[in-house]
Structures are given as structure tokens and as C-alpha cells.
Image: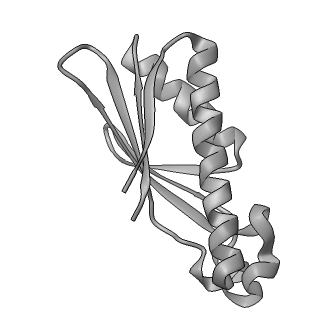
Amino acid sequence: MAGYKLVVSGDHEAARGIMIKTMQGQDFSMEPTGDWSARAERGSKGASLALGALAGKSGRHLILDIACSPSDDGNFTIMLTQSTSGMSGGLIGMSQAKKAYNEVYESLVAAFQSAGTFVAGEAVK
């Protein structure tokens, strides 16, 4: 599935903290899956399945797998991989999911820019 890549500078623990705080501010629950990885989830799987597009963007079930790694140049790379597509809501649900994922990415970019640590970001396939 698609996702996003962010590169940030500075302290890696601080970067991870900014990411977690920003994701939680977007109503994601975070479940660590390793020292530098996590699964972020929000919305209702049941509502997305039962209501389809009527679940809306805020009720749309979203899962992002997150992998963080320090790079050789001293920066910190954060990979966000979409684990849900919104397909249960048809084309409208998929559009809602895409918009919600983009908003999460933009929120993270803004948070790292505000902290003065944003280096680069891009959508990845």
C-alpha cells in the first residue's frame, strides 16, 4: 500500500515524541510493535464495514504502520505505511481515507516544521 516518508533532523527521541503527540492529537491510538516501530489506529472498523461511506472521514477506520530509523547522515526517517484503504466505503470511502491520510501527513510536516527539524517529505508507493 501507499504511504509517506518524512526525514527530520535533531534528537531521535524528540522526533519520535513529536510524532506520537501529533498522531494522538489526530485521535490515533498507538501500539508499539518494536523499539522504533508502531501501529497507529483510529476510527471504527465496525462502523466502516456497516456504514460504508456514511462512516465519514472521522469515523473511517484507518491504520498506519510506522517504522522509524536513524540514517547515516544523522537524520531520522519516519515511514508511514497505509494498512487500510477505505474500500469498505466504496469510492467515497477510499476518497475519505486518502484525505484523512493526507491530513495526518500534513499535520506531521507542520509539527516538525514548527520544531525546526523538518528536512524532507514525500508520498511513496
* Number of numbered discs: 0
Residue 15 spot, x, y in % from top left: 46, 22
Where residue 104 appears, x then y in whole percent? 62, 45
User: Is 125 situated above or below 90?
Assistant: above
Residue at 80% x, 70% y is 56
Q: Position of residue 45 (x, y in %)?
A: 64, 76
Q: Which of 40 and 87 is in front in this view?
A: 87
Q: Which quadrant holds the N terminus?
A: bottom left
Side of 74 where 24 appears, left or right? right
Q: Residue at horizontal 71%, vertical 77%?
A: 92
- Residue 121 sits in quarter: top left
Relative to 60, does residue 48 appear above or below in the rendering? below
Residue at the farthest left position: 72
Q: Relative to residue 110, is residue 55 drawn left or right? A: right
Locate residue 75 relative to residue 51 in the image: left or right. Answer: left
User: In the figure, is residue 109 to the left or right of 82?
Assistant: right
* Residue found at x 44% / y 53%: 3
The quadrant the C terminus occupies is: bottom left
User: What colouring does the structure picture have?
Assistant: one colour
Residue plotted at (64% across, 65% down): 97
Q: Which of 62 and 89 is in front in this view?
A: 89
Is 29 drawn above or below residue 6 in the view shown? below
Quadrant of the image occupied by residue 101? bottom right
Vertical order, 110 against 65 (above or below)? above
Where residue 106 appears, x then y in whole percent?
A: 62, 37
Judging depth in this view, the residue of 110 and 22 nearest the camera is 110
Pick whichever, 51 or 113, lies toward us: 113
